[in-house]
Image: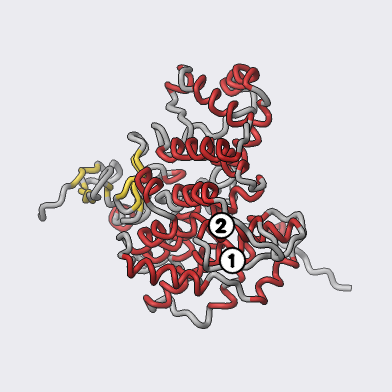
Amino acid sequence: MDDKKYVNAQITDKLDESSLPVLDGTLGPAAVDIQTLYSRHGLLAYDPGFRSTASCKSSITFVDGDKGVLLYRGYPIEELAEHSDFVEVAYLLMHGELPTPAQRHEFDAAIGMHNLLHEQIMTFFRGFRRDAHPMAVMVGVVGALSAFYHDVMDIRNPEDRLRAAIRLIAKMPMIAAASFTYSAGRPQRYPNNKYDYSSNLLQMMFGAPNQEYAVDPVLARALDCILILHADHEQNASTSTVRLAASSGANPFACIAAGIASLWGPAHGGANEAVLKMLMEIGSVENIPKAIARAKDKNDSFRLMGFGHRIYKNFDPRSRVIQQQAKNVLTHLGKNDPLLDIAMRLEEIALKDEYFIERKLYPNVDFYSGILLRAMGFPMNMFTAVFAVARTAGWVSHWLELQHESHGIDRPRQLYVGSTLRHYPGERQPKLVRK
């Protein structure tokens, strides 16, 4: 026997004991390798929601929910939010290391080369209703990119894969901005390479083609911070969707479109929109005790959105950064948003309440991000679209990483609980009626 660690698993319907290898990562819990569980013992692992399942090996992002830690390629998210910018973080996620000055220059140039949309794609927007949700539009338009780049790309070629990943990161701001300007009946501005990534998104969203757009550096920095914080988050629903689609060898644009569709859900990317609606429903600081009482009532459908996280059982490390950015932007703009007052007071009261303490319900990144985006002028239905722009960097990084795996197409199994074998009753056979 080699020097691997093993856990002994008693197989109750077999006569012998079996040993399963334990795989160690660089951080976090080890994983029991159950790949032979079915082939050797005819058993499946049952894990609804994949709460205890490592679906892959990945070196991109590490989350420790108990300690409130989020690392991108080993770098703490707080340090990246303070010192880095989104494009540098995107490079880090894709390549594993921060870029040298020369690599950064080359990466910036590549994004500038690919940030325009084909003019024929711009006509697609007119096929949607004006009141279509931007995420619905983004799913369709990003998926349609497959028709423009499928035949000129070989996913077995590393250079083609990298070019596809850069195209997606580069084009997503224009797709998101066009989703908004089309619904508002405004002409679309094009990317301008004199602006940085976040400034470009702002000028395409809020600028007019017949006017020079002056970028507010405070807002640009706040948006860059939002993009960094949302760039990746391990094997969440949308990232897992991208990897599952990619395992079939699907076109990368189709894979990312699938990720956008998954992100759209209110339990995932749409959570910040739900938080804002909840704060509006509470209405004032005076109504907070009543809202908390309703949240504790099992018979009341009201829920405090933005508290708790599937992974974090401590503070979400992104929430403090977002809260500070929200304060900075509101102070800079001279705004007094009552929703921020409600949010801060709600957090203060909830964190002293035994109900929330016992359940480890701490504010997550969605609790303040909606307030910040609203202060910057983004309409509520664009919140998740901005999230999609950010998460594209993580999605393409996982797509690139998956290309080096050799296990083939992902194929989850199921615990079948339906009817056993039965036969169609002979007396119910349809009779031919001749006329």
Q: Which mark is residue 142?
A: 1
Colouring style: secondary structure
Figure quadrant of residue 370: top right
In the rendering, at what x and y percent does residue 93 appear? 37, 58
Figure quadrant of residue 408: bottom left
Secondary structure of residue under mark 1: helix
In the rendering, at what x and y percent does residue 9 appear? 24, 43
Secondary structure of residue under mark 2: helix
The vertical placement of 401 against 85, above or below, is below
**Mark 2 belongs to which amino acid?**
Ile
Q: CA distance from mark 1 to mark 2?
A: 9 Å
Locate residue 3 relative to residue 92 in the image: left or right: left
Q: Are marks 1 and 2 in contact (CB under 8 Å)?
A: yes
In the rendering, at what x and y percent does residue 217 appear? 52, 51
Q: Which mark is residue 260?
A: 2
Q: Quadrant of the C terminus?
A: bottom right
Q: Which mark is residue 20?
A: none
